[in-house]
Each structure stands twice: as structure tokens, then as C-alpha cells.
Amino acid sequence: MAEIKQVVVPDIGDYKGVSIIEVMVKTGDTIKAEDSLVTLETDKAAMDVPSPYAGVIKEMKVKVGDKVSQGSLILIMECADSSDGTTSHSTKLSKDDSQVAGYAPSQGVAQPPLKSADESAHSKPQAVPVAAPAVAAKAVAAPVAAATGSAPAPGAVQPVLNGSDVSLHSKAHASPAIRRFARELGVQVAQVKGSGEKGRVTKDDVQLFVKAALAQPRGAAGGNGLQVLAMPVVDFAKFGAIETRPLSRIKKISGANLHRNWVTIPHITQFDEADITEMDAFRKELGVEYAKQNIKITPLAFLVKAVVVALQQFPEFNASLDAGGENLVLKKYFHIGVAVDTPDGLMVPVLRDVDKKGIAQIAKELGEISARAREKKITAAEMQGGCFSISSLGGIGGTAFTPIINAPELAILGVSKAIIKPMHQDDTFVARLMLPLSLSYDHRVIDGAAAARFIVFLSQVLADTRRLAL
């Protein structure tokens, strides 16, 4: 038989005139025992007041901003069964809730009073069983967690991968109940903009956030579910004079690709040095010979040819993962991408069928394609289909660096400035021209031993140009 019940503020210790900062139910709602009704906040703590009964709310007696004390009437409800409507209550102190939750029911066994944050830091809360999230919440959590992946715009909100970031949660203004609700949906409260009093996050804010995340185009996260914090918005002008200069179109495009490649590919870089003393001497001889044909023989031409020889020896480097990441696509052609530094940014045109060309032909094509890239005359087709890339900074300087893999390739070779070093040879030290090499590779496919063998073999090829004819 239905019975009318009054729900009042339970024992909250010595606190009087506590503010109601959130009301989580309304007249007409059907609720269960232990459902949160309102959230109270003192100057030191926040707590949820749960319902001691199950039933239908007939009338609300409080609103946000009201001041209440123990015994204050919260609402009137109609209970279906009054034979055993009273329940004992306790709250669960979440690891990532900066507020302290604690209360006692108005009836039954007395509970400890609300504690201050300092007191709670030295006390160990007892574990309290918590009901599993609703099926609907579970269904929403997965798509929310994968809905965004690229860096959001300033002020944007995004789902969280887990709820372990205490520092972020501690900055958010939300009641324990809302935090719990957000966790069930896979949402990070710290990144939800609150619309409640003093910027407090409400249940509606969390729900709107979930809807916005699910409404994003499929694949917006790049399919990898990577979540990153928004970049801080800084007014640099307040620190001194500034100049704003837009990024070039090339840098905008290449920047997005480089960011994707860096965060989605497990990069490892193997370093070595190649003795190119004989190679450089031979290069200078060829340079004199082909100067009449206006062909400049550069060390890069030898590098391109040597890389192809190494790829033929180690075919797993001349491959790509398929879209599903389950199969290795081994390529029977040898197209080499060469990074070109242009005034507008980095471009990587591709030399095709390098295995069928000699040093002079490679040098000629390198000069032509590099000139077209700097003049913005390169076509999109000339930048596609690469198997392996080379990024040479030898003309600038440096001793080593970590080049970023040009996906869907599996490796890239970085080349630094060659320097003369004393090398031990035949029980004596001799001056040799040493070329620093940096090989970055995709560790999902290539292991360290294979990478070491590749770069050692490449160094041997560069040290003995006769191997280029093999």
C-alpha cells in the first residue's frame, strides 16, 4: 500500500545552514533507494544526500542555493511499500574526488560526522559496494572514449581514457554523484564546462558533452583512440612584443601528418657511422666528369643507390602494414623519397625505380625534382608511392637526429654532416671521413636486431662503392 514519506537532511554533524549546490531530482521522478537527491557543500567538504526510500517524488521542498541543516525537509514522496522503506546509508569516497563525502541517515545507526579535508587525508575510508553502471551507460562509454583524438580547440572538452588523473579532477567543480556519473560514461569532469552555480558541472553538462562527442564524424580520432589535453591558451602579448605569422599550407598539411606518424608509430632510432672516404673521392672524380653535362654528383645520389641495395638485402624494410595492421605488404619496386627543404616547408618527392638507374641518372633526377619542389612545381603524384625515405641534413650540420617515419613506410634514414675522424686501422690511426647515420624504424614490424643489421650493411655498402654494382 502506498504511503507518503518525508525525506529530511540526515545527520551532518555540527554544520548549520549548509548550502544546496545541486538538486538531482524533480517532482514526478521515480527513484530508487540510495539515489542521490541533493548535494550539500560546506566550506570544507561536499556530500550527496541519498534517498532512504524508493518511490515517486510528489513535491520538492528545496532548490539550489537554499540553506539547510539536519532535519530540514527536502521532499515529499510516495512509497509503494512502507514495510521496510528505511535503509542504512553510506557513501563511497572516490580516489579522484577532491571533496570529502560523508553523511548519516536520519534514522537508524549514527554515522561519523562530516570531516574536513585535512582530517580525511589521514583517515582510511571503508570500502563500500557500489552498484554497477546501467547498461545504457556502458553502451555510451566506448564510443565516447574513441570519439575524439586530435588535439581539441582551446576551451573544447573531450572524453578521458581513464579516471586516474587526480590533479585534473581536483580542479573541476562537481559533486561526487556527478563525478561518479561521468566516470560511468567515460568522461573526464575536468574538461567539461560547467553551467551550474559558480561554474559547477551538472548532470546535464555531462550528458550534453556525451552527445557532442558522439555527434563527431566517425574516424575523427584517427581510429586510434588517442586522447591528449588541449594546448593552453596564452596571451603572449602581455609578456612583450610579438608578431603573428600564419603557417604555410605545406607546414599545415605536413604538420598534421608528422603528428599522426609520431604518436601512432612506435619509433626506435639506430645510430651508426659509415666510412665514406673512398666513396667521396670517387664522387669528386665523377663530379668533374659530369660537370660538362651540368649534372652535380652529390653524396645523396650514392646514399639513394646504397639504400636500394640494402632494401634488396632486407625486404622487410621495403614493406608496409596493411590498413588492418594484420599483414605485411612486401613491395617488389624501389621508390625512394627524398626530403627537400623549401622556403614554405618540408616536401618529400619520390624517385621511382631507383634499382634500375645508375648514380649519374639518380643525381640528375635529384637535382631536377628538388628544383621543382622549391619552385612549387612538384605534383601530388610525384610525392606518392615511396617505399623508404631519406632526410639529409649533411649540408647544414649536426651529429645525429631522430627522423619521423613517413607512413605508411616502415623506416627512414637520417643523414648528418660528415666529419674527418681519427680511426684505428692496421695498428695506427688514420684520418677518415665518417658519415653519421640515423635509422628510425617501426618497432611493430622491425626489431632492433634487424635494424642493426640493416644499418651495418648500409655502412659497408657506402664504405665500398663496388657493392653498388652487385
Image (cartoon, grey):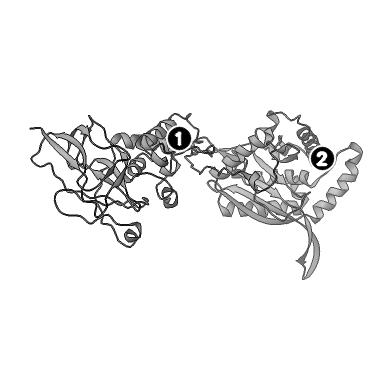
Place of residue 103 in the rendered image (x, y in percent of width and height, measured from the top left): 24, 51
10 Å crowding of disc 1: few (<14), some (14-19), many (20+): many
Q: Residue beneath label 1, please?
A: 147
Task: Using residue 460 as the reference point, say whether residue 277 is left or right of it.
Answer: right
Task: Using residue 204 as the reference point, say whether residue 113 is left or right of it.
Answer: left
Circle 1: element type: loop
Q: Residue beneath label 2, please?
A: 360
Circle 2: element type: helix
Q: Which of pointers 1 and 2 indicates the residue nearer the eye?
A: 1
> Which comes before the other along the chain, label 1 or label 2?
1
Place of residue 280 in the rendered image (x, y in percent of width and height, measured from the top left): 82, 52
Place of residue 440 in the rendered image (x, y in percent of width and height, measured from the top left): 62, 49
- 275 or 55: which is nearer to us? 55
| Residue shown at 73% from the left, 43% from the top | 304
Residue at the extreme right:
292
Place of residue 2 in the rendered image (x, y in percent of width and height, measured from the top left): 10, 32
**Amino acid bearing label 1:** Ala
- 451 or 174: which is nearer to us? 174
| Residue shown at 21% from the left, 51% from the top | 11
Q: Are marks 1 and 2 in contact (CB under 8 Å)?
A: no
Quadrant in which the N terminus appears: top left
